[in-house]
Amino acid sequence: MLTQHFPALLVVVPLMAAPLIVFARRSLASWLIALLATAITFGIAASLLAQTLSEGTLVYAMGSWEAPLGIEYRIDAAGAFVAVIVAAMGLIVMPYSRVGIAAEVRSEEHYLYYALMMLCLAGLLGILVTGDAFNVFVFLEVSSLATYVLIAMGRDRRALVAAYQYLLMGTIGATLYVVGVGLLYLETGTLNLADMATRLVDVGDSRGVLAALAFITVGISLKIALFPLHLWLPNAYAYAPSPVSAFLAATATKVSIYVLMRYFFTIFGATEVFDARATGAILLGLSLAAMFIPAVVAIFQHDMKRLLAYSSVSQIGYITLGISLDSVEGLMASAMHLFNHALTKGGLFLVLGGVVLRCGGAGFDRLAGLGHTMPVAAFAMVVGGLSLIGVPGTAGFISKWYLVSAAMHEGQWWLVGAVLASSLLAVIYVWRFVEVAYFRAPPADHPAPGEAPLSMQLPALAMIAACVYFGIDATWSSEVSMRVAEVLMYNPGVGQ
Amino acid sequence: MRLDIILRVLAKLLIPFALVFGLYVQFHGDYGPGGGFQAGVIVAAAVIFYALIYGLPAARRVVPTEMVQSLMAIGVLLYSGVGIASILLGGNYLDYFVLGADPVSGQHRGIFWVEMGVLITVASVMLKIFYVFAGRRRDAEEAEE
């Protein structure tokens, strides 16, 4: 009975938790509310994924006003898949946050941290579940505004500049998106995404549609941090509090990638985007640039958080590469890498958060000799690093394997070489950590720290273990990714 | 401070009317232009006007900072609470039809409480922003002295 309201409750539960936390004020009480809300949200997301996999698209009319008159929530396997990633990451970060933010956020601001995390979660999930183009913009802003403040909470004063930089870039991105939506509204007369997709077929070739495609692609690419629009990302990830870095790395860019996939395949239709326009070629070029240039930049970083951030920009290149192939196989590889990279990078940032707590920073001078002082954390970082490279037995290998076979399927053999060469760059930047952690003596003033507290270590190790698990048994992730790709490619939701 | 007697008297005259006009915009939103957002801005403007004429401490005595922060949350809870009430009464989220005996009164009741939530949150967020900016400058001046 209640399950029919799940598409709405997915957003409403974290949204209502935020004001409740403002009332609770006390750090412990707000943490408990946030923990409960994320657990419920994850349950709803998991149930939605199960429902969409078995029954197809779920439609929910807000206020019982039927679309296209009213706003509808429409979720299919693709949206639910990303929603599960986001909600799961929220659930993992919450127990971690209790100790994780104690050292980084002032105690009288703890409740604000939890409230903003809830708003960010509500915004990200809202983007995934809504069936309305303008609603996507609203939720994009809800999550972004919460994110800016969360980043600014970092104890380093540079966090303020990083948040401001992201605010400028994010606002430009959102503005470009809304201009694109406005043009689409002008051409089709509707804001409902499914309705828009059917009407665009009749509108056909027009300058307005082309401009809308360009505005939306560039606007969302800013949010994705697609090279060369990634400049906000390294600072934002580096100076945000550790749990925020982990949560954002695993979710924010992934949700934007989902929006891009939706527009490319469901709204504009793959033929419009890839055959009639040069979009595919541009995306391919940018993806290749993203795979190489930020990876080289990552090699020259002296701070582990910045290194991982640049690595994220590089890994996003793999995901968009899969999109640019314009095939079910390519999309499936993208969806899979979206999941696997969320696991890997989320896990790495969580482990790093514990290290920063003990060592007082993520600079390589602070991390020297980590293999001796914090053996478990150092080993977990190495395992996560192997997944970044794509070593067999880790999640990263599976998605790169699918990406390579998708490229071969399209007859693009040279892309195989590109993926391999880019992975070699990942070997170098991961090796830099290994060298610092295992082949250097700990700094003289090192307080000889132990491992991170259990409440931080367990969620982090669970993520790293999941990296290995989904690297060995990829049955679930590959089956669901395949469904996601088919849903996106053949739009079974439209016109029903 | 003696020369601003005209401002002080006029403010006392105008602020009640501003507040009543805010409520008019709020409740007339059902029939014509208006609604919670506009009304919230007008209500907040009345308090900000009071703060400009009588000083920030006086305004903070009338509408304390803690109250503003609670009101921000209450508005959101009120809005989303209407949605939950709709679900509990057997409709979809924010379905006003089930809130009353007949559809028209249901719609009236739903939009009334939702707009009330918007009024409370918009007015308190406006005030919060004003307090934060005005307070910053004050604190800086106090630090200099």
Image (cartoon, rainbow, N blue to C red):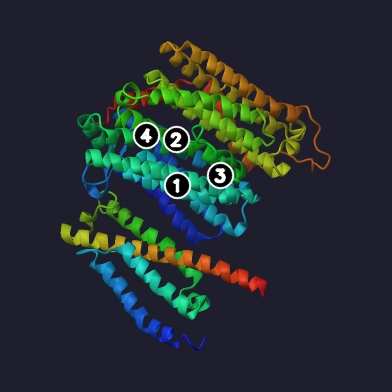
Nearer to us of marks 2 and 3 is: 2
Q: Give the distance between the C-alpha atoms of the residues marked 2 and 3, in whole angstroms.
A: 21 Å
**Circle 4 marks a residue in which chain?**
A
What number is the disc on residue A252? none
On the image, numbered disc 2 is attached to which residue?
A221
Among the two numbered marks 1 and 4 on one chain, the one whose residue lies closer to the N terminus? 1
Among the two numbered marks 2 and 4 on one chain, the one whose residue lies closer to the N terminus? 4
Is the residue B140 above or below the residue A259 in the image?
below
Specify the farthest residue to the right. A444
**Do the dots labelled 4 and 3 sit on one chain?**
yes
Q: Position of residue A469 (x, y in %)?
A: 54, 24
Among the two numbered marks 2 and 3 on one chain, the one whose residue lies closer to the N terminus? 2
Q: Amino acid at mark 3?
A: Val
On the image, numbered disc 1 is attached to which residue?
A171
Q: Amino acid at mark 2?
A: Ser
Q: Amino acid at mark 4?
A: Ala
Q: Position of residue A310 (x, y in %)?
A: 59, 33
Nearer to us of marks 4 and 3 is: 4
Q: Give the distance between the C-alpha atoms of the residues marked 1 and 2, in whole angstroms.
A: 13 Å
On the image, numbered disc 3 is attached to which residue?
A244
